[in-house]
Image: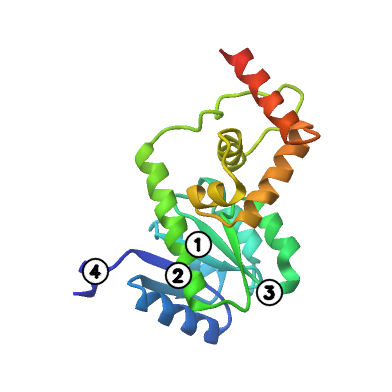
Amino acid sequence: MAEQSSRGEIFVVDDDPAVRDTLSMVLKAAGYDVICFADGAALLSVARSRTPAAILLDVHIPGKSGLDILKELQGEDYPAPIFMISGQGDIAMAVGAIKSGALDFIEKPFRGSEIVGRLDEAIGAYARRQAQNAAPKFGSLHFPGREPLTRREREVLEQFASGASNKEAGRTLGISPRTIEDHRANIMKKLGARNAADLIRIVMTAAQRAS
């Protein structure tokens, strides 16, 4: 039966029926169950009581925008990865969405195989982190006088401090190297690091204070 072989539910939110149909077909072929929504209000009523494996959320939807919905779901604390779907002109907006808790963004037009691959990576990485059930090593570090890092920025910082490349960090966290670079730039700005070596020095100083 389909239920027995399902890899989990994917919630798709897009006001374009063609996009919903395409994503539904591609994701079902990859073994996922798919529930489609034409607007954010419909998603919210379901997503608060039922947790999917992941959410694909378009930036531009009727009523509340995808960014508004992301904030209402408290993206970074939502118990499943949320991807923003954005057109080429929405990249700055999509990067802003990452700061609001989206895991990553997927650009239109997209290839079905690319979306399946990105979702597989993200869901797998999320499951591994849940299984480890441990806070990042840098989760308790404090950087006095600096803007606090988000939980995901701390995860990226942990990867960076352990010597991982953007590609390796992206693979571990289930997000694209480009998004890792955005997080890294934001971390350096928040902590006042001039370069990579300076960032490591700031982290090690904080770790010494904490020990």
Residue identified by numbered label 3 = 87
Q: Which mark is residue 144?
A: none
Quarter holding the C terminus is: top right
Quarter holding the N terminus is: bottom left
Secondary structure at badge 3 equals loop
Where is residue 29 drawn, in percent x and y? Answer: 36, 78
Residue identified by numbered label 2 = 116
For label 1, count other residues whose C-alpha is less than 10 Å away and answer few (under 14), some (14-19) or many (20+): some
Of labels 1 and 2, earlier in sequence is 1
Task: State the CA–CA distance, disc 4 to disc 2.
Answer: 16 Å
Q: Is residue 48 above or below residue 40?
A: above
Which residue is located at x 35 percent, y 41 percent? 131
Where is residue 117 drawn, in percent x and y? Answer: 46, 66
Mark 4 or 1: in front is 4
Of labels 3 and 4, earlier in sequence is 4
- Examine the image and state in which quarter residue 140 appears: top right
* Callout 4 amino acid: Ser
Where is residue 10 drawn, in percent x and y? Answer: 42, 67
Which residue is located at x 40 percent, y 54 percent? 124
* Callout 3 amino acid: Gly
Of labels 4 and 1, earlier in sequence is 4
Nearer-the-camera pick, 91 or 38 = 91
Q: Residue furthest bottom?
A: 18
Mark 1 or 2: in front is 2
